[in-house]
Image (tube, rainbow, N blue to C red):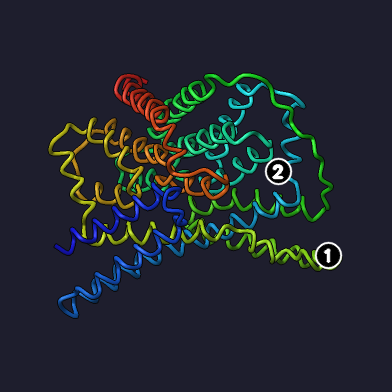
Amino acid sequence: MLDTLLIIIAALALAGVMFEEVLHINKAKITLFFGTLAWMILFIASGSPAETDAINEGLLHNITEISTLWLFLVAAMTFVAYLNRKGLIANMLNLIMPSEISLKKLMLITALFSFCFSSLADNITATLVSIAMVLSLGLPFNQTMRFAVLVVFAVNSGGVSLITGDVTTLMIFMQKKVTITQLFWLLIPSFLAVMVLTGLLSIGMTGKVKIRKTTYTSNTIDYVIAGIFLSTIIATLILNVLFAIPPMLTFLAGMAIMFLVANHMGEGKDDDQDPIMDYIRYIEFDTLLFFLGVLLLVGMLEHIEALHSLLYLYQVFPPMTANYLMGAMSALIDNVPLTAALLKANIDMSVSEWMLLTYAVGVGGSLLIIGSAAGIVTMSKVKGLSFARYGKYFLLLLMAYSVGYALVYSVATYIMPIV
């Protein structure tokens, strides 16, 4: 009875996000209310001190995961807020873009940039920079929507073949289900799936876009901080692989270095209204609260082992079909606990089937705006982008996801074994 009530609460929170425009209640308020309510009910319904201790331990584990993501977001968003406000992203756009370009070619460039950058950086950083570039183009909202959808799918696809690009990929690798070399084979199917979506979103888009060549005057300190940002991204990858240092810790260190360097170089002395520490204020804290609410709900579902019921899919369907459905479900349920549940169950699958699962849980979250960190960050940045408006592209996203999944199956089953 209690588990049923808690699942209903999670469903109500999801419904509140889906119908945000009808209810006129911010999604962060809805998820935060239901997320905290669910855990409070768990404590109230506890039948013994031992059960209360178990609930408390589950909550602390959940809060640890949330705080890790929060701190990482704070550091990454502060960097991007500074670079965007100082015009460095716009200046970079001026360098790589012609003064006039067709919408279709612009969409192709956006797809390539988002895909490649997410292979080098984490998904959140890649999304922040890619969306900042899209918004600087000043496109009409209906066109911006298409570009935003493409960025989410391309970013999630770009990191799926690298252990540093996606947490679920790292989890599957750490359990020795696949090797790094085998994961690289996901790169081509993922890229082709992005190209398929690019083509689908380009249908009906005609005309050219004039790139606004607004040149911002940047100081030496701005380029130094841009260098610190890039160095932080590179250091995050290297330190995580060599010493297993969490990306959050490296990014916080990078942000601290940014503040210290700015202080040493005299940032803010000539303009007391714009000190570098104030750039934390430009972070969308409603995004952080939304993350908090969603992850509290997911943590609750994980605690009551509601996610384990999804494992019955593997008893009903063959692994190839079950993995496809699991990827689609990761658009509603956080892919990390979902993957953890599958790994704990120790389901017997071949290497090709584990590669299918890796692609599915890494890219499947793109089907809905709330299914991935990239989607939630995009929703916070693109004003007017809601669950329902993103949902209009569900069929196109499902087609691209399905094509990518089929290509991974072909590569892993027929090409990889003979090479």
Residue drawn at x 21%, y 54% is: 306
Q: Amino acid at mark 2?
A: Ile
Residue beneath disc 1: 271
Asked if the residues shown at circle 2 and circle 1 are in contact, with their CB atoms under 8 angstroms apart, the answer is: no
In the rendered image, residue 314, in percent from the top left (x then y), is placed at 17, 39
Q: Is residue 154 above or below residue 24?
A: above
Q: Is residue 249 above or below residue 43?
A: above
Choose top left, top right, bottom left or bottom right for residue 304.
bottom left
Where is the N terminus found, in terms of image quarters? bottom left
- Give the farthest residue toward the right: 270
Q: Amino acid at mark 1?
A: Asp
Residue drawn at x 40%, y 66% is: 64
In the rendered image, residue 75, in percent from the top left (x then y), is placed at 59, 59
In the rendered image, residue 10, in percent from the top left (x then y), is placed at 29, 56
Secondary structure at badge 2 equals helix
Residue beneath disc 2: 89
Q: Nearer the viewer, residue 252 or 40?
A: 40
Choose top left, top right, bottom left or bottom right for residue 397.
top left
